[in-house]
Image (cartoon, coloured by chain):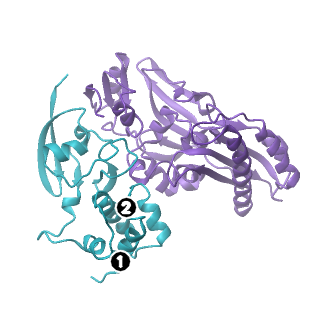
Chain colours: A cyan, B purple
């Protein structure tokens, strides 16, 4: 039952391929096959949201998707959020500048979730809307206050 | 943990999928996977074969046709919540569906998957029972339609046979001068609900109730319909009418679990039932 399958997909704008068993999750595929360690795995059962990635622009739990299911789709991981030069993007800078992280474990998922939120709420919306947007990602350090402030700051930043 | 190995099929057509299901060798349908995959990781579920239906075209359309809203079973929950046509045709779907899981799980989780998995905490199960929806299922043996009110048999148990695939949910469009309400209590925002109440109320020109539905979740093994139409008929949901509803709700005998007691559930059910019915009545009057 160790039949391997070819998986071809686009990750952060680059075509990537790998050979995996059907039971390998997208999260493990990203980390172990593609060596993209920015996608963090915590509970692995869909509760904590720390493995969120963008599948065709929408947040999904990469621990609840098999890599074979992502074949032919377009993915964005936290590695894809930085500027092409490799410097931090605006949202990342806002997290950095506003204490939007402590241990940093949830940060990739928070950033991707916030990125999706700001696409539909470019003016930042209300704090309640921000909190609802990030409620599917668990953070055990910050108490969320500074994460909300970071997202608000990213929306308000010029340019 | 990681899932046990399985044979994986991702058919491109409904016919192929039904053929695979008909083989009957410990096969499960993989739709959104938001419930099934965690159970596979806990190794509660160890299916030998997974039939991934995500690549089958035409199973995720939402359309209004002949006075009903037809929702493809593969419609993502978030898509249903965002769909203006669906919200206009039957607002209870959005009112209930927006509470299902989190945005990231709703992007992937499907309407049909939520119903077929039949979790006692699945908001959409209450909606389809309250709305008297019909579920269309297919197999190589033929197609059939199952009333939502006869579909749920117990926690995670439905009228679906192992070789059948749920393909479409048909929901009657809202009546004129009708409104809906949905309330739930959870431990945290987006968490599993402890109790929920879904209500739909229709009123006459004077704002008096002509029809009412109330469905509670987690007061029994399946979505629990409370017969509120008779006591509410002709009323404006005043004190006497609501006390009559209280009595009906007080008859439920919910079980407790490690989080909340059965007594708590019954008390909360009373409050949520009132709130959902009052919201439904108010929105019905506003629509009149």
Looking at the rendered structure, the secondary structure element under dot 1 is: helix
Q: Image point 33% across, 69% down: which residue?
A: A100
Q: Position of residue A92 (x, y in %)?
A: 26, 70
For the point 36% across and 28% down, which residue is it?
B43
Chain holding disc 2? A
Q: Mark 1 or mark 2, which has the lower sequence index?
A: 2
Q: Identify the subunit bearing mark 1.
A: A
Residue B129 vs B187, above or below: the answer is above
The residue where tag 2 is placed is A141
Of residues B270 and B144, the one nearer the viewer is: B270
Dividing the image into 4 quarters, which one contains the N terminus of chain B?
top left
Q: In the image, residue B125 lies at what x, y percent?
A: 57, 39
Q: Is residue B177 left or right of residue B217?
A: right
- Residue B25 seen anywhere in this rendered image of the structure: yes
Q: Is residue B27 above or below residue B122?
A: above
Numbered circles on residues, count? 2
Residue at the disc numbered 1: A153
What residue is rendered at 39% in x and 55% in y? A138
- Image quarter of residue A25: top left
Residue B68 visible in image = no
Q: Is residue B36 left or right of residue B246?
A: left
Mark 2 lies on a secondary structure that is loop
**Location of residue B61 in the rendering, given as x and y in whole percent from the top left corner:** 42, 45
* Identity of the residue drawn at 78% across and 35% down: B251
Alpha-carbon neighbours of circle 2 within 10 Å: few (<14), some, or many (≥20)? few
Position above or below: B143 against A123: above
């Amino acid at each position: 039952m160790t039949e391997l399958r070819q998986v071809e997909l686009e990750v952060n704008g680059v075509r990537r391929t790998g050979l995996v068993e059907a039971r390998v999750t997208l999260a493990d595929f990203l980390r172990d096959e593609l060596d993209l360690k920015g996608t963090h795995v915590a509970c692995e059962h869909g509760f904590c949201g720390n493995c969120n990635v963008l599948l065709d622009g929408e947040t999904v739990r990469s621990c609840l998707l098999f890599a074979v299911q992502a074949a032919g789709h377009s993915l964005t991981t936290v590695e894809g959020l930085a500027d092409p030069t490799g410097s931090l993007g605006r949202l990342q800078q806002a997290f950095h500048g506003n204490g939007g992280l402590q241990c940093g474990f949830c940060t990739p998922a928070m950033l991707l979730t916030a990125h999706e939120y700001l696409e539909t709420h470019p003016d930042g919306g209300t704090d309640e809307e921000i909190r609802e947007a990030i409620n599917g990602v668990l953070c055990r350090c910050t108490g969320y206050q500074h994460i909300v402030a970071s997202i608000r700051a990213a929306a308000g930043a010029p340019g | 943990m990681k899932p046990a190995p399985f044979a994986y099929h991702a058919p491109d057509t409904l016919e192929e999928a039904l053929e695979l299901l008909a083989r009957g060798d410990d096969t499960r349908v993989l739709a959104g996977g938001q419930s099934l995959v965690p159970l596979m990781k806990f190794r509660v579920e160890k299916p030998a074969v997974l039939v991934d239906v995500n690549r089958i075209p035409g199973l995720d359309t939402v359309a209004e046709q002949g006075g009903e809203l037809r929702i493809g079973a593969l419609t993502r929950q978030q898509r249903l919540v965002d769909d203006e046509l669906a919200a206009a045709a039957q607002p209870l779907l959005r009112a209930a569906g927006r509470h299902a899981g989190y945005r990231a799980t709703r992007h992937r989780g499907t309407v049909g998957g939520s119903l077929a998995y039949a979790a006692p905490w699945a908001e959409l199960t209450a909606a389809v029972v309250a709305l008297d929806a019909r579920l269309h299922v297919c197999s190589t043996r033929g197609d059939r339609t199952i009333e939502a009110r006869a579909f749920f048999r117990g926690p995670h148990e439905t009228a679906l046979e192992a070789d059948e695939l749920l393909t479409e949910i048909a929901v009657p469009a809202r009546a004129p001068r009708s409104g809906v309400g949905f309330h739930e209590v959870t431990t945290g925002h987006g968490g599993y609900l402890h109790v929920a109440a879904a209500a739909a109320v229709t009123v006459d020109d004077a704002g008096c109730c002509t029809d009412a539905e109330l469905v509670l979740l987690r007061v029994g093994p399946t979505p629990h319909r409370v017969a509120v139409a008779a006591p509410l008929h002709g009323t404006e949901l005043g004190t006497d009418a609501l006390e009559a509803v209280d009595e009906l709700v007080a008859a439920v005998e919910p079980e407790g679990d490690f989080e909340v007691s059965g007594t708590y559930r019954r008390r909360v059910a009373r409050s949520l039932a009132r709130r959902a019915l009052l919201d439904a009545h108010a929105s019905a009057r506003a629509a009149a």
